Amino acid sequence: MSLFRKKQDEDALDIHYEGNAVLRMLSYLKPHVGTIVVCLALVLLITGLELYKPIITGDAIDLYIAGDYAPGEAVQERFQGVLIAAAKYVGVLIALFICTNRVQLLLQRTGQKIVYEMRRELFEHIESLSMRFFDLTPVGKIVTRVTNDVEAVHELYANILVKLFRNVVKIIGLAVVMLALDVRMAMLSFVMVPLVTVLTVLTRTLSLRANRKMRTCLTALNTFLSEHLSGMKVIQIFNREKAKYREFCDYSEAHYQASFRAIMVNAVFRPIIVFTSVVAMAIVIAAGSRGVLEGTVSFGTMYIFLQYIKTFFEPIQDLAEQLSTLQSAVASAEKIFTLLDVKPLIHDPEKPAAPDEIKGRIEFRHVWFAYDNENYILRDVSFVIEPGQKVAFVGATGAGKSSILNLIGRYYDIQKGEILIDGINIRDLTRDQIRRAIGQVQQDVFIFTGDVKSNIRLREERITDEAIREASRQVNADRFIDKLPGGYDERVTERGSTFSAGQRQLLSFARTLAFDPTILILDEATANIDTETEQWIQDALEKLMTGRTTIMVAHRLSTIQHADKIIVMHKGQIRETGTHQELLDQGGIYHKLYQLQLA
């Protein structure tokens, strides 16, 4: 199976929504019930006016044009009657314009409000999800849910629901009026209705399948684009442009085929409906003409029926299109609700502990942890870090060092054991309580689009401009910020691509220190920094670590020699603990690592 097909099958596993998506979509209308009721009332009025239009013309034909009058007899009265009928017709058109305009305005406004609320709810929910979700879910898939799928659902609220109601009411109204005018001709007009009903049901089924497939293919395409545009540099470095182009064409072709099938469903159905309406009209013309010649049907009634036949099949055609759009909206809604139903793996306690302050004492008690609940990364890990201590974790790649940092911030939950901060189990603290106390600097720094100042503050308005400058000064970031044309207001491109790796790391230090954390976590914080920049940071760290619990992970042992305690990890277990000199004297794993780096 090709890579593309395999990914398609994986996507297909999570598109099935167990609940009733339509009912759940309707729940978003609850705050707007008043507006919807007004719109429905206006739709009823619009339908009545549209039904009345042919009657005005038909009555005018029977009363003032086709009547049995002698030449010149009551010409003036007849002309006045025609003018009155024309005035009524114009009045109906004006009323239709006003009512239709009002309905469209109300619906579009309501639809936009619902879309805004849905996007807000989605993003808020996404922020609440555990890191494990983001480890497993492509960014492009999430972006598609928040953008394309929500926009598809917008059509339901802004147009489809009321139009469906309008067309159903119109069809019922037309049937009632036609039966009231002439039962025989009405029944002839309805001959093709059973065929249309069967076709509509069939179209609904085919349309839902086609639109589900189309949405799945669109998600796969967006996921591919998001991932490969972000990694374009790697693609060009390894000269894989042609291979990736072919892969993109596979995704694009799949989306094209799925979209084409969705279009073809409507393209086949609509001409059939048009054909049935023509057949129905031919039947009415044949029967009506005979009735007119025999004197059992008036010219006006004949005109009304012809207009109604044309109008009768128009809403059926519209229903087919609206059902197609409805199925597209339902398919998108199923994906949105599937995402909304994803439960966070980490929950805050109902009654959290409320310490006056977090001092920074960290304790692991027989901790076992696996990302997948099976293959343990940490095995029976126990240690204590006292407030204000500087502790470093070292070990080979995959030893579990970064996992310990993630567990302290409770980005993941452990399977066995306990993690305590100031003697309180972190499960008894909220995530906000824990993370407000922790400042973490990672090896890969993410810089947001905006300016330098906003990347340090991160929309925390309590951090003043002066605090930003002070934090930057302490980590020596001001040395390059002050040289920028805009200083702290200098615009920053996506991911900070115009800054060097060292400059991005300095911004990350300033960002962390501006929040004044009790616990400072440095995850390979100096790995990507040149010698001069590292000297600036080491100078700042000596001051900043004072009074803060500091946890460091580093491959370069020269950066952690002055730590109060060094913990050596190997295959998920603690093998050695001590100071730099104590560990060298032991001649164990740390000594070997140190000798390798010296060599």
Image (tube, rainbow, N blue to C red):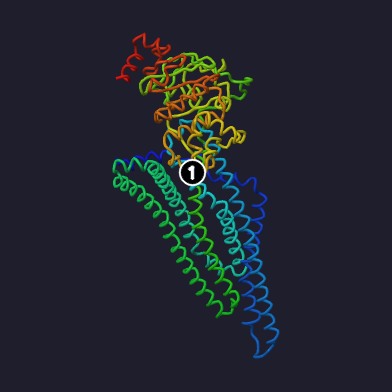
Q: Residue at x 52, y 19 (%)?
A: 549
- Which residue is disc 1 drawn over? 145
- Name the foreground residue: 133 vs 61: 133
Residue 291 is situated, as x and y percent measured from the top left of the image, at 55, 76
- How packed mark 1 is, by other alpha carbons closer than 10 Å (few <14, some 14-19, many 20 or more), is many
- Name the foreground residue: 411 vs 512: 512
Element type where label 1 sits in the image: helix
Residue 159 relative to residue 498: left or right = right
Residue 505 is situated, as x and y percent measured from the top left of the image, at 45, 32
- Name the foreground residue: 178 vs 57: 57
- Name the foreground residue: 106 vs 84: 106
Residue 192 relative to residue 4: left or right = right
Residue 109 is situated, as x and y percent measured from the top left of the image, at 61, 53
Q: Residue at x 47, y 41 (%)?
A: 142
Q: Give the mark count.
A: 1
The amino acid marked with disc number 1 is Arg
Relative to 468, say whether 224 is above or below: below
Residue 168 is situated, as x and y percent measured from the top left of the image, at 57, 58
Where the N terminus falls, by quadrant? top left
Single out the residue that lies furthest toward the bottom. 71
Residue 458: which quarter of the image? top right
Where the C terminus falls, by quadrant? top left
Relative to 469, say whether 112 is above or below: below
Q: Residue at x 59, y 47 (%)?
A: 114
Relative to 383, say whether 273 is above or below: below
